[in-house]
Amino acid sequence: MDDHDLEAFLLDLESDRVERKSSAANGNELRRAICAFANDLPNHQQPGILFIGVRDDGSCANLGITDELLRTLADMRSDGNILPLPTMTIQKKTLRGCELAVIVVEPSDAPPVRFRGCVWVRFGPRKANATIEEERRLTEKRRARDLPFDIRPMSAARLADLALELFRRDYLSATLPVDVLEANQRSAEDQLSSLRFVAVEPPSTPTNLGLLVVGQDPRQFFPGAYLQFLRIEGKELTDPIKNQKEIDGPLPDLLRRLDEVLQAHIAIASDLTTQGSIR
C-alpha cells in the first residue's frame, strides 16, 4: 500500500477499514482496533488501517512520532494480549504535511482473533464485541481457509492454465464409466469443480491439485514438479553419468513419458555361449 492509497484513506470517513487516533495514550483501545481489523468481519480480504496522530475530523494532531512510540506500537503485536498474533506493519509516514504512525493490519487466516479473550469486530466506523452469530461466522471463515494443500486455490492461476482437452480425453475416460460420462450433461467447469480441480471461491480458480494433474505447465506454478531420470555408468553416485533427463508436464503425460524412458533404458544381459564358443 503506497502513500497515495494511504492519503485516500486518510481523507475519507472512518469505516470498517479505517480508524483515526490523535495519540497512542490508550493502548487497549488501539489493541481492540487491531483485533477488529484482523477479524475482518465484512470479509473485505483487505488490510485495515489505523492512523495515529490525526483527529477524528482529519486534522493533524501534531503528535511526535518517535522511535519509542513505534517500538511501543510494535510490541502490541506480540505482548500476548491479542491471540492469535496479528500480521501487521508499523511505519512512520508524512501525509499531507502531517507526521503519523500508520498501522496496517492484515486479515487473519485463523479468526476469531481475541483481545484478552474477547472477540472484537468492526461494523462501519464502530467496533464492538462480537455476537454469538458473528463469532460463529468468523469460525466458519477459519475452517474454510484451513484446507489441505492440494485443494487450496492458486490465486495466480486462471482456468486457461488447465488443459481441458487432456482433462476430457485422458482423465475423465480413465476415472469414470462411459455410460456415466454420456449421461453427464454438466459443463467442463462444473466437472472440474466436482473433482476439486477448480475452487468454488474464488470462482473458477484452479486448485493446486488441478494444476498438477491437468495443468498446461505445472512447473510455472510449482518449479519442483518434475522427475529427474539419471543413469549412471557404475554403482556409485560419483560414477560418470551415462544419461539423464528431466520429465515434467501434467501428471498423466508425466507418467506416460516416465514409462517410455524406463523401457528405453532397460538392459537385459544374455549369455549366448555354447560349448565354450560365443555366438
Image (spheres, rainbow, N blue to C red):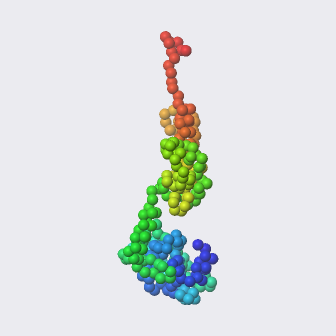
Instruction: Determine the image quadrant of residue 9.
Output: bottom right
| Total count of labels | 0
Instruction: Determine the image quadrant of residue 242.
Output: top right
Residue 229, percent across and down? 54, 39
Residue 135, percent across and down? 40, 72
177 vs 76: above or below: above
Residue 147, percent across and down? 45, 59
Nearest the viewer among 189 and 21 is 189
**Visible residue check, residue 64:** no
Nearest the viewer among 170 and 228 is 170
Q: Residue at x 58, y 59 (%)?
A: 156
Q: Residue at x 49, y 45 (%)?
A: 180
**Residue reaching furthest front?**
183
**Residue reaching furthest left?**
117
Nearest the viewer among 93 and 116 is 116
Which quadrant is home to the N terminus? bottom right
Nearest the viewer among 144 and 176 is 176
Q: Residue at x 54, y 52 (%)?
A: 186
**Visible residue check, residue 170:** yes
| 148 lies left or right of 14 | left
Q: Residue at x 42, y 66 (%)?
A: 140
Which quadrant is home to the C terminus? top right
156 vs 168: above or below: below
